[in-house]
Image (cartoon, rainbow, N blue to C red):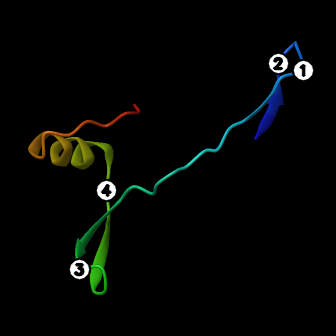
């Protein structure tokens, strides 16, 4: 997405979105499991991580 400020300065924004899936296995052999918000929070808490969005 590109937008311009009032002074005609142009900016470009790139959105990167990830699906809510947990992959279990190796890079060449894995199983994708859908995750709800509660599961994602439990995993983040267990791994001392954060979820940057609500």
Q: Residue at x 23, y 79 (%)?
A: 26
Residue 47 - label: none
Q: Earlier in the sequence, mark 3 or mark 2?
A: 2
In the image, residue 4 lies at what x, y percent? Answer: 84, 25
Left of 3 or right of it: where is 43? left
Q: Which residue is mark 4?
A: 35
Where, by quadrant of the figure, is residue 24 drawn? Answer: bottom left
Q: Residue furthest top?
A: 6
Question: Is mark 1 in CB contact (under 8 Å) with mark 2?
Answer: yes
Q: Secondary structure at mark 3?
A: loop
Q: Residue at x 39, y 55 (%)?
A: 20
Q: Which residue is mark 3?
A: 26
Picture layout, residue 24 above or below residue 5:
below
Q: Residue at x 13, y 39 (%)?
A: 48
Q: Could you give the CA–CA distance between mark 2 and mark 4, rounded to whole angstroms?
A: 39 Å
Where, by quadrant of the figure, is residue 44 drawn? Answer: top left
Specify few, some or many for label 2: CA neighbours under 10 Å numbering under 14, 14-19, or 20 or more.
few
Q: Which residue is mark 1?
A: 8
Front position in the image: 42 or 13:
13
Question: Is mark 4 in CB contact (under 8 Å) with mark 3?
Answer: no
Q: Residue at x 26, y 47 (%)?
A: 40
Q: Nearer the viewer, mark 2 or mark 4?
A: 2
Q: Could you give the CA–CA distance between mark 4 and mark 3, rounded to whole angstroms?
A: 19 Å
Q: Which residue is mark 2?
A: 5
Q: Secondary structure at mark 4?
A: loop
Q: Secondary structure at mark 2?
A: loop
């Amino acid at each position: 997405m590109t937008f311009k400020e009032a002074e005609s300065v142009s900016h470009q924004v790139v959105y990167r979105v990830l699906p809510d899936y947990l992959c279990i296995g190796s890079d060449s052999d894995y199983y994708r499991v859908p995750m709800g918000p509660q599961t994602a929070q439990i995993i983040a808490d267990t791994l001392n991580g954060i979820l940057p969005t609500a």
